[in-house]
Amino acid sequence: MTEIMINIQTLANTNNAVILTLGAIKFNRNIPLPPLEKCDTFYERIYSHSCEAIGLVSDIEKINWWIQRNNSESKYEAIINPLRKNIYFVLKEFKKWVGFSSNYKIWSPRNDYIILENAYNACGLKKPWSFFKTRDTKTLFDIFNRDIDYNSLLNYHSLYDAHNLVLELQKSIIIFDSRCGK
């Protein structure tokens, strides 16, 4: 079964945040994840002004957080790289990439797919998943007492982070299977 891991970078910590980048990977939880360059991925940078035009917001604390980032690649990708697209077109492209299968499960840290869903609503577009197909990585990691250090796990690059989250998800499944005697 194909599943999708989503990760976004934003300009606020609210559910209606401006989205800077959207990264996603299709995967099968039971098959080892290949290196990133061999995965079926989606990645786009988004114009912040296109998000603000549909009512998404930024906050000065998060803007300052990005400015102070030491990781120059993540900062460049999130806020400096000029190659960006309008949020409306990125969401349409993402929907096309996801496809029309009702079998997909959508994984992300809970707030990411909520922010993305709010962006779809603000654009007047239908999101490409059903609410009952969403899965929350933070809750899963907590259930298995996985003390994930998000600051070391995540690069704050949407695509790299989606890849790392799939790897951690697969480790959690191995823990589950070992506890169940599989």
Image (tube, helix red, strand yellow):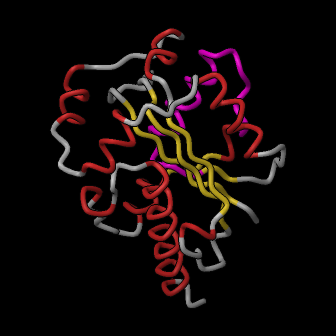
Magenta stretch containing residue 102, yes or no? no
Magenta stretch containing residue 124, yes or no? yes
114 left or right of 125 in image: left
Q: Is residue 52 shown above or below 136?
A: above
The span picked out in magenta is: 107-130
Position of the C terminus by quadrant: bottom right
Residue visible at 37% across and 60% down?
142
Q: How many marks?
A: 0
Residue visible at 51% across and 31% down?
84
Residue 57 image point, x, y percent: 39, 16
Position of the N terminus by quadrant: bottom right
Q: Is residue 21 shown above or below 138?
A: above
Q: Nearer the viewer, residue 120 or 141?
A: 120
Which residue is the extreme one toward the bottom? 181
22 left or right of 30 in image: left
Residue 24 image point, x, y percent: 58, 51
84 left or right of 28 in image: left
Residue 62 image point, x, y percent: 25, 29
Q: Is residue 19 shown above or below 173?
A: above
Q: Nearer the viewer, residue 60 or 89?
A: 89
Q: Is residue 150 shown above or below 86?
A: below
Q: Nearer the viewer, residue 176 or 63?
A: 63
Residue visible at 48% across and 70% down?
167
Residue visible at 25% across and 62% down?
152
Residue 38 image point, x, y percent: 63, 70
The picture quadrant where one finds residue 64 is top left
